[in-house]
Amino acid sequence: MDAVLARGRNSNRALTAVVALVFVLPGIVAVFGGVDLLRADPADVTLGLLCIGGGVAVFVAGMILQARGLRVVEADANGLVVKSKSGQVVAQIRWAEPHDYWYRSAQLRKLGMPVATIVNVRVVAKDGRAIRIDDAMGENAALQEAVERYTTDATFARLWTELASGATVAFGPIALSAAGLRVDGLSYEIAQIRDLRFLPGALHLDLVGRDGGRDVPMKDVPNYRALLRCVAELKRTA
């Protein structure tokens, strides 16, 4: 690997599920049970305190185990690698190999107001190897930006070569060729496309001479940045 350009951390989802079921939930139940014993009439102070203390201990043990299960994700100009806390390589995908980039985001709201945006990106190799990067509070934002930049550069170069040779390239429900774009059975020539742009949760297709356009859910479209770049290049060279 080259010099690391961005670094972040991801949890082990399987371990997170185990911690939640074996440590967190029992710990919470024990604490509330202990509180109920202290409030009972007559109160069982000894057993109540034991329950609360045990619940807190189990909860803390789960959090320590969860922290030990964190994985380091690193990106450089060569590829993406995931390492365990001990430094052992768990997964690796190089930009030069064929892969897909998936982007999903969800906005959390409170009283109708946005309070946070959760962003999940995945890089999936053709043999099924996958690397996931989650971000909710900006802790992995720089890593996600670096991954998007490098995967888009590599994927665009590969797909543009295919388009130039006359091939049709699939982006989920969208099929793109030098002649135009096809979505859900409807075809549009490149000259008909006024704009194709990213919106929260969707790609918006704006057509010449038509109002409203149409949206395609982002969760269904891999390599969306490469798609936007391919369409822009086709419009430029048309």
Image: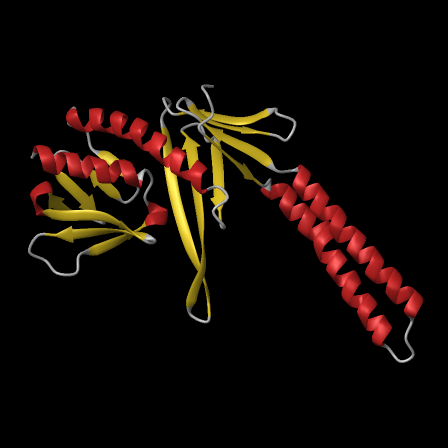
Q: Position of residue 167 (x, y in %)?
A: 19, 29
In this rendering, is residue 27 above or below 150? Answer: below
Q: Name the residue located 60 percent from the left edge and 40 percent from the top edge.
A: 12
Figure colour scheme: secondary structure
Decide which of 102, 68 is in the foreground and name it.
Answer: 68
Q: Position of residue 161 (x, y in %)?
A: 21, 24
Q: Tell me: 97 left or right of 132.
A: left
- Is residue 186 shown to the viewer in this render? no
Q: Position of residue 74 (x, y in %)?
A: 49, 29
In this rendering, is residue 177 above or below 53? Answer: above
Decide which of 159, 138 is in the foreground and name it.
Answer: 138
Q: Name the residue located 34 percent from the left edge and 47 percent from the top edge.
A: 220
Decide which of 6, 18 is in the foreground and name it.
Answer: 6
Q: Name the residue located 65 percent from the left edge and 42 percent from the top edge.
A: 15
Image label count: 0
Q: Tell me: 179 left or right of 205.
A: left
Q: Tell me: 234 left or right of 22.
A: left
Q: Position of residue 168 (x, y in %)?
A: 20, 33
Q: Name the residue located 40 percent from the left edge and 51 percent from the top edge.
A: 105
Decide which of 40, 76 is in the foreground and name it.
Answer: 76
Quadrant containing the C terminus is: top left
Q: Quadrant of residue 13?
A: top right
